[in-house]
Image: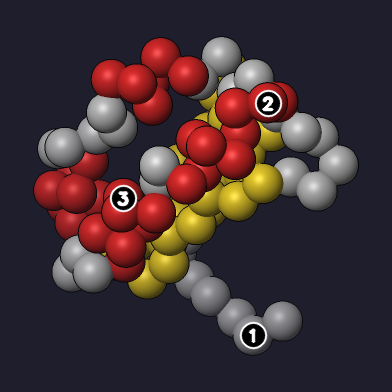
């Protein structure tokens, strides 16, 4: 299993529009085979920060989805990104 987690930075006044433009991508990801979870969400304290969280069954399924990537306007709106990929070998209930 893979977890992709981190954050993106956008202009604070543009964050809501950025997230609204991601609805289709989120729905598309969640419908993709191997996607266990996919979320882009506003940080409640930092108006320019967007949290990224994804869970995938395999690297191959993630790579198949990533082929399309964000649109040019979405990419241009990202001021900074700190997103990491975590390889998970086991899962336990919390």
Q: Residue 93 carries which label?
A: 1
SS class of the residue under badge 3? Answer: helix
Quick one: label 2, few (<14), some, or many (20+) residues within 10 Å?
Answer: few
Quick one: label 1, few (<14), some, or many (20+) residues within 10 Å?
Answer: few
Vertical placement of residue 67 versus 4, above or below: above
Q: Is residue 82 visible?
A: no
Report the Cα–Cα distance between label 1 and label 3.
29 Å
Identify the mark nearer the N-term, 1 or 3: 3
Image coordinates of residue 48 in percent, x first then y, are 70, 28
Identify the mark nearer the N-term, 2 or 1: 2
Image coordinates of residue 69 in percent, x first then y, are 24, 34
Tell me if 37 is positioned left or right of 33 in this view: right
- Place residue 81 in its image quadrant: top right
Image coordinates of residue 45 in percent, x first then y, are 86, 42
Q: Mark 3 points at which residue?
A: 25
Identify the mark nearer the N-term, 3 or 2: 2
Q: Which mark is residue 13?
A: 2
- Place residue 80 in its image quadrant: top right
Tell me if 63 is positioned left or right of 93 in this view: left
Tell me if 70 is positioned left or right of 55 in this view: left
Vertical placement of residue 32 versus 79, above or below: below
Question: Which quadrant is the N terminus positioned in?
Answer: bottom left
Quick one: label 3, few (<14), some, or many (20+) residues within 10 Å?
Answer: some
For image coordinates 20% across by 64% down, the residue present is 32
For image coordinates 76% across by 33% down, the residue present is 47
For image coordinates 16% across by 37% down, the residue present is 68
Tell me if 45 is positioned left or right of 80 in this view: right
Counting the numbered discs, the total is 3
Q: Which of marks 3 and 2 is in front?
A: 2
Report the Cα–Cα distance between label 3 and label 2.
21 Å
> Do callouts 1 and 3 mark residues in contact (Cβ within 8 Å)?
no
Q: Which mark is residue 21?
A: none
């Amino acid at each position: 299993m893979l977890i992709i987690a981190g954050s993106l930075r956008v202009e604070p006044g543009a964050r809501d529009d950025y997230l609204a433009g991601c609805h289709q991508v989120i729905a598309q990801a969640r419908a993709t085979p191997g996607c266990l979870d996919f979320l882009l969400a506003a940080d409640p304290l930092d108006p320019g920060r967007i949290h990224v969280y994804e869970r995938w069954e395999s690297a191959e399924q993630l790579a198949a989805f990533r082929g399309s990537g964000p649109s040019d306007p979405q990419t241009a709106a990202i001021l900074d990104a700190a997103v990491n990929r975590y390889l998970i070998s086991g899962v336990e209930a919390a």
